């Protein structure tokens, strides 16, 4: 790889690293060169000496930096975790179940970056269509951080009634605006003011509470969100001086398990332990009665066993199980570009159906795509054929 | 370490390894020197080039070898696994839930070796007391392989009514007799004949069936054992020409999970996935109705959640949770020797109670010992105090 054609000194300085560090990152393949429509950039594949995973350096004259979105840590108990973590007030926002996107404008071009730092052509096109991104002309140093949600996406296909566009269930909600070179967040109020000024969809606070009583309020909110089948909350310092923390519903723990155990040999082992521990601490903290705990246990057991047995049944009947998602493209060209991107991501997919649909915005392409989990399919076949477990 | 004082050539030859291999095993710390009452021996800590984990070479004139007990693989489905694995007939034996022991006599001394190849002073004394080991004088080349079961042992304390001795619940059942230098097993019939001749307690066949119909019989036996709260079966070729395979009950899967999730941060993550997968394939193969599957899911969920919440409650109330077992010793000296052995095993234990008891065999020492799981205790405290999950 050729790394001598751009100014390593300047990159090192911007990231607060030494040249030696950069060399090391290249050698360890943590830092790699990537390309999107001839725009070359560098990508941090992992966290490295304070530089977040997913950080991207555009190889233009400015060497524009887009820092990776920091990991949001999780509260296992509401009390005393919230009280200990925050300074004074706590902003409670809903956590949406989609995928994390940073939107930036570099040299006049809009890019939507995934959590891992890939410029996703599908998402880039959608955000350009959904949003008026004037704000990035006025504040080019910002990145709009938010959640892309809805059924029609390739990462976290999950229905949300509020993003129904008729032929497509997809939408973007900003939950953070940051200086893209420093990762400094705007205070919650300023973020909301800016979003309102530029008419951008954004996550609204559910409550602003004192940290000492926050656990009582959050528990009520969580119980409500749980009933509605929603994911959970992110808790924030009003000034964003403290890193946010998250907490999720029983419903989400079970949904995560259901998805993971549908493809259990691929996803089960990584998902299960953390979800179960969350449930254990929630049952303890919510001082459940024996009846309530039994109900929770039943939900958990079914979230694990049912999808697993259903998958084994399907494979036994000769089916190859896949995780299917339906995407809407404006043109064949967009569809092809997306497929190239999936290949680059090393996702194994199969195209199950492609059709043209008429919409109020003209003819579109609707593609049904299946993500293949080879390990689950192959191992099930093998055990059904008599292979022993070692 | 001094390895030059004994004949490496002869050891290499006996194990069908080269001197170079032996050197490598020493260097990688797979092969180590150990000692029991001044009897030095070498121990394979891991499987190495065909030599089983737990293989021991006594450093006497003969360089007597005791091969490690081979891993018993597991059937995930009964059909077609049994049919494919065996030649003709299949012997169905009950699998007991205790710990695997090999009994040998070397230079006139009896030793009981654990699965890992440690000479356990506790077990050695118990088998010498429980069994008449004349057989090892007549057949010094054999090792008696069996399961030590019952509540009063330090490894798998699990009550079995058939080994109740009044003041102690403990007993040994032979399930295999092997040539200790070659690991060759006696045919099932010969093993039983020898056990009967020498009046040794042994596992008796529950059935001998044709491999083609074995899955039907085994399912019935498993359902019966499940009702009785017993572990499962080991399936064997009558001539022991094929390696045995095992299959366990729903009851056992749940009991395993209950034990593991009592100390969930220490044991949970390693136990859970395999147990759940076994349940998934069993539910599929037994063609369960929706009701039956829901019952299984409920059992699974409760086996995971309940012990976890109970442990969190205990720790929240200031208790330090431990796995307790009660052992009976003949003398203070035996007790001390056992404690030294536990320290050598790097087990963290606490002595909770010691008392003298009167038995029909005289005064004995009854000790209540707790095995400490530090990770579970410490992590729970930490999350209860507000530590975030990374």
Image (cartoon, coloured by chain):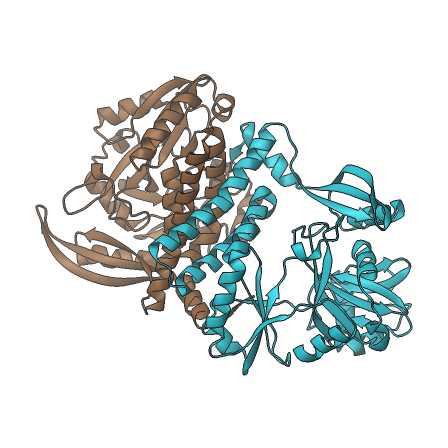
Chain colours: A brown, B cyan
List the single residue furthest toward the front.
B360
Percent x, y of residue B87? 55, 82
Instruction: Decide if residue B76 is in sight here.
Output: no
List the single residue furthest toward the bottom.
B88
Residue closer to the observer: B145 or B386: B145
**Quadrant (top left, top right, bottom left, bottom right) of the N terminus of chain B:** bottom right
Instruction: Decide if residue B213 is in sight here.
Output: yes
What residue is shown at x 47% (from left), y 36% (from top)? A14
Residue closer to the observer: A211 or B183: B183
What residue is shown at x 41% (from left), y 64% (from top)? B286
Q: Quadrant of residue B106?
A: bottom right
What residue is shown at x 19% (from left), y 52% (from top)? A329
- Using the image, determine if residue B130 lies above or below residue A87: below
Percent x, y of residue A166? 14, 44
Q: Is residue B169 toward the left or the right of residue A253 in the image?
A: right
Percent x, y of residue A389? 53, 66
């Amino acid at each position: 790889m050729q790394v001598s054609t751009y100014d390593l000194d300047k990159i090192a300085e911007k990231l607060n690293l030494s040249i030696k560090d950069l060399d090391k990152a290249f050698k360890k393949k943590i830092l790699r060169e990537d390309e999107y429509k001839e725009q070359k950039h560098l990508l941090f594949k992992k966290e490295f000496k304070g530089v977040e995973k997913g950080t991207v350096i555009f190889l233009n004259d400015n060497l524009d930096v887009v820092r990776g979105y920091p990991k949001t840590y999780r509260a296992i108990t509401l009390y005393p975790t919230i009280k200990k973590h925050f300074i004074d007030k706590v902003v409670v926002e809903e956590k949406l179940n989609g995928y994390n996107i940073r939107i930036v404008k570099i040299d006049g071009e809009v890019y939507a970056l995934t959590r891992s730092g890939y410029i996703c052509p599908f998402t880039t096109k959608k955000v350009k269509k959904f949003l008026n991104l004037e704000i990035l002309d006025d504040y080019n140093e910002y990145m709009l951080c938010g959640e892309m949600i809805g059924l029609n996406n390739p990462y976290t296909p999950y229905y949300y009634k509020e993003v129904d566009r008729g032929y497509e269930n997809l939408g973007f909600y900003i939950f953070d605006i940051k200086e893209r070179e420093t990762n400094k967040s705007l205070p919650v109020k300023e973020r909301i003011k800016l979003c309102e000024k530029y008419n951008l969809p954004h996550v609204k606070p559910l409550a602003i509470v004192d940290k000492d009583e926050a656990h009582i309020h959050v528990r009520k909110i969580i119980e409500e969100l749980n009933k509605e089948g929603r994911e959970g909350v992110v808790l924030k310092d009003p000034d964003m001086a403290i890193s946010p923390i998250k907490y999720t519903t029983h419903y989400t723990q079970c949904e995560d398990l259901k998805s993971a155990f549908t493809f259990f040999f691929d996803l089960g082992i990584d998902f299960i332990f953390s979800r179960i521990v969350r449930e254990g601490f929630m049952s303890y903290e919510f001082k459940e009665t024996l009846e309530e705990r039994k109900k929770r246990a039943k939900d958990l057991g079914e979230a694990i066993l049912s999808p697993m047995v259903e998958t084994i049944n399907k494979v036994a009947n000769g089916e190859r199980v896949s995780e299917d998602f339906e995407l809407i493209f404006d043109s064949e060209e967009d569809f092809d570009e997306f497929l190239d991107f999936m290949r680059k991501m090393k996702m194994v997919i199969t195209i199950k159906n492609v059709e043209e649909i008429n919409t109020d915005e003209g003819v579109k392409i609707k593609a049904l795509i299946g993500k293949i989990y080879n390990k689950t399919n192959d191992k099930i076949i093998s055990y059904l054929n008599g292979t022993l477990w070692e």
